Image: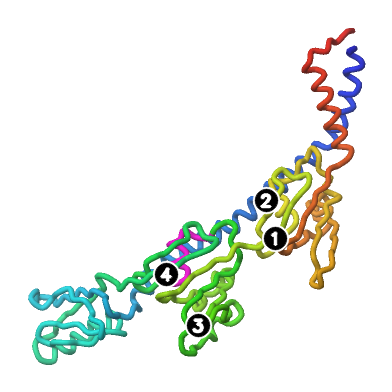
Amino acid sequence: MTLRSWLLPNMILLGLLAGCSSYSMTMTRHQAFSQVEVQSKTQALNEQILSLGARLTARASQDYQVGPEDLLEVMVYGEQDLGRAVRVNGQGQINMPLVGTVKVAGMTPREVEAKFVDMYGERFLKDPQVSVFVKEYRHSRVALTGAMKTPGFYELIGPRSLMEMLAMAGGLDDRAGDKVHIIRPKAPPRDTKGLQLAAASQSFEVNTETIVIDMRQVLKDRTGKLNVTIQQGDVINVPFAGNAFVFGAVNKAGNVPVKKDLTVTQAVAMAGGLNTMLADPGGTTILRMGEEGQAISLSANLGRIIKKQEPDIPLKENDVVFVPESVVRRFLMDVRTLVGGGMSVGYSMVP
C-alpha cells in the first residue's frame, strides 16, 4: 500500500467524523443529563420517604393507644414500691398496687398517666406525679413486597405509618412504579374521604380491601391523611413499573421502567444512550399499540428534541423505541475497521 493510497481514505474518514463530533458531544451531554434526571427522581422520593418516616415516628408514638400484650413501665415519683413494669392482659387491663385492676386499653400513655394521678390522688397520695411509657409494644408482622430495596416481613412495633414502613424496607427500588397498594382484611365501613383522588379503596380479593395510593400525592399532602396508619395483617405492595423497550443503535438495548412523565429521550438515556458513532437519531420511531389493538407509529427526531425544536414525547407501557443506524456512519465505521485491519497486518507505506 502506498502512502497516498492510505492517506486518501483516512483523510476523508477523519473529515466526515470531525463533522459529527460536535453533534455527538451534544447528544452525549443530553443523555447524561437525562440519565441523572431519571435517577434523581427515585433518589429524591426515597430521601423524602426516609426523612418523613423518621419525623413521624416520634409524633405517632405520642398518639399510640395501649393494647393487649403491651408492656408498660409505670413510675410514681417518690414511691418506689408503687412503680413497676406490667403487661396489659387480654382484656386490656393492668393490676397496680393500691388501686387494683385498671382498664387501659385504647388510651394513650398520657391518658393512662392522668388516670393514675386521679386514682392515687383521690385516696392514697397527695399531688402524685406519675409517668407511663410503653416499654414493649405488642408485636405483629407486616409483609412488604414488590419494588423496594429489601422486601420481606417486618415487625409492626408500635404505631407505624406507610412512609415509616417503606423506610424500614430501605425505600423504593429504581424500578418501582408510582403507586402503592395496601391490602388488608375487610373491616366495617369507614370514612375514606381523606383518600379521595390520590388513594382509592378497592376490592381486588375476597374478604380484603386494597387502598391504592399515589406516592407523589403523599409527598405533596401536608395534612398527612394519605400517609395512612398501617395495621396488623396489612400487606404493602409496590408494583414494578410497566416497561417500554428500546432497541437499535443504543448502548444497552432492552426494557426500561415507565414511570410518570418518562419521555423518549429519557428512555434512550436509560438504555445507555445513543451509540453516537452509528445512530441516526433523526429517524427514531416509537411503535405503540392503540386502545383498539391497532399499531401506531410515531416519529421522533431526537436531535430536534434536544435543541427544543420539537416537544419530547411521553412514553406509555409497552411502547417500542427504535433508533436506526445511519447508513453513512455504518459505512464509515466499516471503512475505518478495514483500514485499521490493514494497518494491523503490517502493510508497508512506500513513498
Q: Position of residue 129 (x, y in %)?
A: 16, 80
The reply to whether dot 2 and dot 4 touch (C-beta < 8 Å) is: no
The reply to whether dot 3 and dot 4 touch (C-beta < 8 Å) is: no
Mark 2 to mark 3: distance in Å? 41 Å
Sequence order check: which comes first, mark 1 or mark 3? 3
Q: Position of residue 223 (x, y in %)?
A: 50, 78
Mark 1 to mark 4: distance in Å? 32 Å
Magenta region: which residues?
161-172
Q: Nearer the viewer, mark 1 or mark 3?
A: 3
- SS for tag 4? strand
Mark 2 to mark 4: distance in Å? 33 Å
Count neighbours of disc 2 (C-alpha within 10 A) and say few if under 14, some if 14 to 19, many if 20 or more.
many
Q: Nearer the viewer, mark 2 or mark 3?
A: 3
- SS for tag 1? loop
Amino acid type at image mark 3: Asn
Look at 59% across and 69% down and name the residue there.
179
Sequence order check: which comes first, mark 2 or mark 1? 1
Look at 69% across and 49% down and name the residue there.
271
Count neighbours of disc 1 (C-alpha within 10 A) and say few if under 14, some if 14 to 19, many if 20 or more.
some
Amino acid type at image mark 4: Val
For residue 203, side relative to residue 60 (left or right): right
Sequence order check: which comes first, mark 2 or mark 4? 4
Count neighbours of disc 4 (C-alpha within 10 A) and say few if under 14, some if 14 to 19, many if 20 or more.
some
- For mark 2, what is the residue? 270
Q: Is residue 163 magenta?
A: yes
Q: Looking at the rendered structure, which numbered label has been put on residue 238?
A: none
- For mark 4, what is the residue? 142
The reply to whether dot 1 and dot 3 touch (C-beta < 8 Å) is: no
Q: Looking at the rendered structure, which numbered label has been put on residue 262?
A: 1
Sequence order check: which comes first, mark 1 or mark 4? 4
The reply to whether dot 1 and dot 4 touch (C-beta < 8 Å) is: no
